[in-house]
Amino acid sequence: MDLAFILIQLLNGLQYGMLLFLVSSGLTLVFGIMGIINLAHGSFYMVGAYLAWSLASMTGNLATAIAIAIPLTVVLGMALEKLLFRQLYTRDHLYQVLLTYGLILVFEELRSIIWGDDVHGVAVPALLSASIPLTDNLSYPVYRLAISGVCLLLAFALYVLIQKTRLGMMIRAGASNRDMVQSLGIDIKFIYTLVFAMGVALAAFAGMINAPLSSVTPNMGSHVLIICFVVVVIGGIGSVKGAMAASLMIGLAETFGTVLVPEVAGMIVYVLMAIVLVWRPEGLFGRK
Amino acid sequence: MAEHILDANGLHSFYGASHILHGVDFTVRKGETIGLMGRNGMGKTTLIKSMLGLVRPRQGSVRVRGVDMTHAEPHRIARQGIAYVPEGRGIFPNLSVRENLIMAARPGIDGRREWDYERVLHTFPRLGERLGNGGAQLSGGEQQMLTIGRALMTNPDLLILDEATEGLAPLIAKEIWSIIKTIRASGIATVIVDKNYGAVMALADRSVVLVKGRVVFAGESAELSGNQELMHRFLGV
């Protein structure tokens, strides 16, 4: 194993981790701020991938497909929050699990009706299809670097939004005292709708940009969902910073695990989660 | 007669199964100070919450500036120029002092911006020393100043203070009272709920006393403070 090989795995691990961050940031925000366990969050990732595939086949261009798909997912998120999730804020976790599990089934059925049950592939956009040679026989695809860059940019934007803007302050304040936020004249319900839609759009966007790297398949959301719950638990519920740290940790652990110890690779993230939970039951950045 | 900011008529509110308010009327006019008094559990906080949309009254109506807002969302009522300093303060412990203030900033209903970040810090110099601190790291008095300062950031016409000096050391409580006087003098109407009846009545133009969810006295503060028998019967002092 040489340096170039390690570098490639490192880049792959980071890229996978960042992609996980896009999905899990929405999950942890909705969980931490609205107190909702959303099992259907992985479905948004799947919806994103299928939208990217179908729109890219129609328009012949992934970038155009993504530009059309993002507003659609925002609208989907807003509609779901207003029609369904809003009813759950004051309900017990059992109701949340029942409704969101039901939504997984609905999304899978709709996907089957609209797009069928076949496995699809999406071509890497021509502009980003090159590879950067690292050694004589090893190279690294530009597309992976590009999506890492986009994810990093989005993570930074999310950080600025939540930590530096007034909207972010309102969002965080809402997590601690909803009534008080309203009594200051702030429409917390609308803010919740926005946060939820943002989470949906981020997860769907992750599915869109990852479509060229993995195939677009039925049930692709469930694997992502489970890993993202691991991310949220390791990072600490509600902590975007924690989601970032945990996503990168898991991305690297799974990538290196798969090449170094393939026999037990499937277990590594769960072992990692168990270790973190024994050490810090509230997660890396969670509040006690 | 000055413009009415808030009019509650015949409010009946429940807390769970218990009937807390039994047909309460309550009016606040522009610029006036009202002492809302009564012993613990008589319905003062429930009355305030019912008028702010935080508790839904079963019967009766709440009008804000003459418009019926009985079923309006709390943020719509607040946007009519009503600010609330709740019992227990309600600061956001996960936000810094600076963030607690600027997240609330808003021009008043007529677009005026008399209170802004600088003026609040000028009024509460202690807060200026603790801008980066999380809300939870403040002392009780500082938390209270932060809550009042945050309420002022919304440039209200009416400030409702529920037990603003509760649990504070006498010296700090005195500071809070002098701030309330300043606010009152600036023309903002205030509703003051406080255990220190003497201080409330000294400031309030009118006093309203609740006993078991009913208004038993509503009138000039002097009329109440000068009547030992009423004070004893209604407030136990």
Image (cartoon, coloured by chain):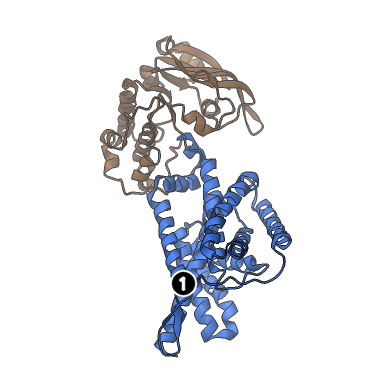
Q: Position of residue A263 (x, y in %)?
A: 59, 85
Q: Residue at x 59, y 51 (%)?
A: A77
Q: Which chain is blue?
A: A
Q: Quadrant of residue A4?
A: bottom left
Please say if A55 is above or below A17.
Answer: above
Q: Residue at x 40, y 31 (%)?
A: B164
Q: As drawn, is B64 to the left or to the right of B71? A: left
Quick one: B222 or A74, which is closer to the camera?
A: A74
Q: As drawn, is B61 to the left or to the right of B32? A: right
Image quarter where the C terminus of chain B lies is top left
Label total for image: 1
Please say if B8 is above or below A145.
Answer: above
Name the chain letter of the residue that bears numbered label 1. Answer: A
Quick one: B188 or B195, which is closer to the camera?
A: B188
Image quarter where the N terminus of chain B lies is top left
The residue to which callout 1 is attached is A128
Mark 1: which amino acid? Answer: Leu
Q: Position of residue A267 (x, y in %)?
A: 59, 78
In this view of the protein, can residue A234 be seen by the observer? no
Q: Which chain is brown?
A: B
Q: Quadrant of residue B109?
A: top left
Q: Position of residue A78 (x, y in %)?
A: 58, 47
Where disc 1 sits, the SS reads: helix
Quick one: A54 or B111, which is closer to the camera?
A: A54
